[in-house]
C-alpha cells in the first residue's frame, strides 16, 4: 500500500531486530513516505545513527536533551509534524514504559506528546513476548487505540523458536498504511475472490492460468485497511494470507463457487478478481492417466460462474467484477457488466505493458452505469484503492440500502 505525502516517524528501540531498521526505512520510503527516525540509546548498540540517516536521507534524532537536536528538531515538532508513528522493533521495555505513560527519553516523550496514530511491532525473545506482563502491556496499548503488529513465529536470534520475530518490512508498511487509511468501509463485509482455479484431469494434471492472486490480495489488504471486515477466497497461489483478513483457500471453480455461496451470505460487497476457469475436463480420472499413442481429445464442460450464480443479488449488495480481455476490451467488459448484473466492472487489457497477470502493476478502466474512467499504469495497491473509492461512492449513492454491521 502507498504512503505518498505521509510522514512516518520510525522509533527504533534496542532489540537485535534493530539491525533490520534500515530495511524498514527503505521500504517506507519506497512506499512514498518521508521517514523521520528516533533511536533510543540501546538501539544504537545494534544500528548506528549514521546508517539510518543515510537511508532516511535526513538527520536522525537520538537524545531528548541534545541541545542541537532540541533547537533544530525538537520533540514537540516530532510529535506534531508526523502522520503516524511506527515503533519497530519495540522491546518489552518500551512497551512497558509506553503502557504506564513514562517519558524518560526522546521516543517515549514523543509518544506521550503526539496525537498521531501509533503502530507497535514488538520483537523479542519468545518467553519475554509471552510473559503475562508484556501481554498485559500490549493489550493496554491496544485499548488506547495503538495498533499492535503481531510478531512472526520462527527461529529467534536468541536460539529459541516461537513468536518474537520482527515481521517483513512489507508487512510493517501495510500496517502503517492501514493506520492512516480513511476508515470509510467500516460498515462493510467485503468478499474478494483472487487467483486462478485448477481444473483437474487426473490427480496430477490440471488446467489453470497465470493469475498470481496479486490483484485480489491487494484489494483484500486495502479493504481491511479501510476498516472493512474482509473474507478472501483465494485459488492456488503462493502469496501469504494477508493480516486482518479471513483467507479461505480453494482449488477449483466448483470449490470457489461453493465457498462464495456460503461465505458470501454475509457480504455487503463482493469483488471478483479471480481468474476462474470457464471450462473443466468433463471427467476426472481417479488415477494418473497413461500416455496413449496418437492424438487425444479432451472433452470439456462449463464450470459454475461464481459471480453470476453464487453471488445472490440482495438489496444493498455491491458486486464488482473484472474482465480480463485481449481485444475489444471496453465493449466486452460492458457485455459482462450487463450479463452478470454487476454494479461495476474493472476492464483489464491484459496485453498492455505492465498490466494483468503476475505483475505488481495494472492498467484498468472502471465501468459502471454512469460511464467509464480509464486509469493510468498504477501499482495493484493503487488500483485496489481506486476500486474501493468507487465502491464507497456507490454506497454513498444508496445509503438507505446499506446492510450495515448488524446484518453480518
Ligand atoms: O492475479 P494477478 O496475477 O494479479 O492478475 C490479475 C487478473 C488479471 C487475474 C485480474 O486483474 C483480472 O482481470 N481478473 C479477472 C480475470 C478473468 O478471468 O476475467 P473473465 O473475463 O474471464 O471473467 C469475468 C468476471 O467473471 C470476473 O470477475 C471473474 O472472476 C468472474 N468469473 C468468471 C468465470 C467464472 N466461471 N466465474 C466467475 O466468477
Image (cartoon, rainbow, N blue to C red):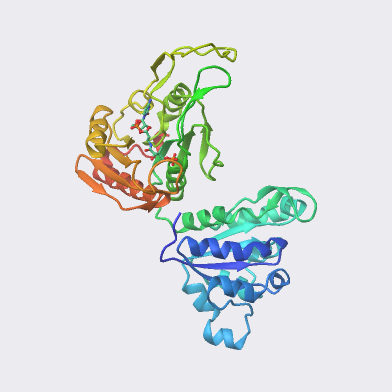
What percent of the width, then of the height, locates residue 28? 51, 62
- In the image shown, does 195 or 392 lie closer to the viewer? 195
Residue 55 percent coordinates (x, y):
57, 70
Q: Which of 62 and 48 is in front in this view?
A: 48
Q: Which residue lies furthest to the left in this view?
A: 370
Q: Residue at x 65, y 65 (%)?
A: 100
Relative placement, left or right, of 359 versus 108 is: left
Residue situated in front as seen by the camera: 87 or 285 = 285
**Residue 321 locus on image (x, y percent):** 33, 35
Q: In which quarter of the image is ligand 1?
A: top left
- Residue occupying image coordinates x 48% and y 39%: 212
Q: Which of 85 and 139 is in front in this view?
A: 85
Q: Is residue 372 above or below residue 232?
A: below
Quadrant where the C terminus is found in the figure: top left
Q: Position of residue 66 (x, y in %)?
A: 62, 85
Q: Can you name the residue that lies furthest to the front here? A: 294
| Horizontal side, residue 276 vs residue 325: left or right | right
Residue 143 in sight here = no
Q: In this view, does 317 lie above or below 203?
A: below
In this rendering, the answer to whether 115 lies above or below 340 is below
Left or right position of 229 against 375: right
- Quarter-of-image position of residue 107: bottom right
How many discs appear? Answer: 0
Q: Residue sitting at 59 percent across and 53 percent down? A: 149
Amino acid at each position: 500500500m502507498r504512503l505518498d505525502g505521509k510522514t512516518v516517524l520510525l522509533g527504533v528501540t534496542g532489540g537485535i531486530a534493530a539491525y533490520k531498521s534500515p530495511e524498514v526505512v527503505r521500504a517506507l520510503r519506497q512506499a512514498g513516505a518521508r521517514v523521520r527516525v528516533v533511536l533510543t540509546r540501546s538501539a544504537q548498540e545494534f544500528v548506528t545513527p549514521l546508517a539510518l540517516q543515510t537511508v532516511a536521507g535526513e538527520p536522525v534524532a537520538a537524545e531528548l536533551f541534545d541541545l542541537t537536536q532540541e533547537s533544530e528538531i525538537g520533540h514537540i515538532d516530532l510529535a506534531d509534524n508526523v502522520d503516524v508513528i511506527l515503533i519497530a522493533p519495540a522491546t518489552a521495555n518500551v512497551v512497558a514504559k509506553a503502557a504506564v505513560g513514562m517519558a524518560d527519553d526522546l521516543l517515549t516523550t514523543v509518544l506521550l506528546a503526539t496525537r498521531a496514530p501509533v503502530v507497535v511491532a514488538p520483537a523479542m525473545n519468545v518467553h519475554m513476548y509471552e510473559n503475562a506482563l508484556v501481554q498485559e502491556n500490549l493489550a493496554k496499548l491496544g485499548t488506547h487505540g495503538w495498533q499492535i503488529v503481531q510478531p512472526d513465529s520462527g527461529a529467534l536470534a536468541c536460539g529459541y523458536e516461537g513468536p518474537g520475530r520482527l515481521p517483513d518490512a512489507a508487512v510493517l508498511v501495510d500496517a502503517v498504511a492501514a493506520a492512516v487509511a480513511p476508515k470509510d468501509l467500516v460498515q462493510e463485509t467485503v468478499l474478494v475472490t483472487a487467483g486462478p482455479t485448477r481444473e483437474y484431469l487426473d490427480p496430477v494434471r490440471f488446467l489453470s492460468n497465470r493469475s498470481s492472486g496479486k490483484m485480489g490480495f491487494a484489494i483484500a489488504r486495502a479493504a481491511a485497511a479501510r476498516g472493512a471486515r474482509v473474507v478472501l477466497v483465494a485459488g492456488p497461489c503462493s502469496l501469504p494470507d494477508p493480516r486482518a483478513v479471513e483467507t479461505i483457500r480453494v482449488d477449483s471453480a466448483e470449490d470457489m463457487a461453493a465457498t462464495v455461496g456460503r461465505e458470501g451470505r454475509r457480504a455487503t460487497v463482493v469483488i471478483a478478481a479471480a481468474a476462474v476457469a470457464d471450462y473443466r475436463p468433463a471427467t476426472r480420472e481417479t488415477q494418473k492417466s497413461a500416455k496413449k499413442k496418437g492424438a487425444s481429445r479432451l472433452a470439456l464442460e462449463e464450470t459454475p460462474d461464481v459471480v453470476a450464480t453464487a453471488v445472490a443479488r440482495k438489496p444493498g449488495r455491491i458486486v464488482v467484477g473484472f474482465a480480463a480481455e485481449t481485444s475489444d476490451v471496453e465493449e466486452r467488459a460492458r457485455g459482462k457488466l450487463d450479463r452478470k448484473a454487476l454494479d461495476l466492472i474493472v476492464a483489464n487489457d491484459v496485453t498492455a505493458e505492465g498490466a494483468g497477470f503476475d505483475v505488481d502493476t495494472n492498467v484498468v478502466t472502471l465501468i459502471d452505469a454512469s460511464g467509464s474512467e480509464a486509469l493510468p499504469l498504477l501499482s495493484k495497491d493503487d488500483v485496489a484503492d481506486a476500486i474501493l473509492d468507487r465502491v464507497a461512492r456507490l454506497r454513498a449513492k444508496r445509503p438507505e440500502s446499506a446492510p450495515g454491521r448488524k446484518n453480518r
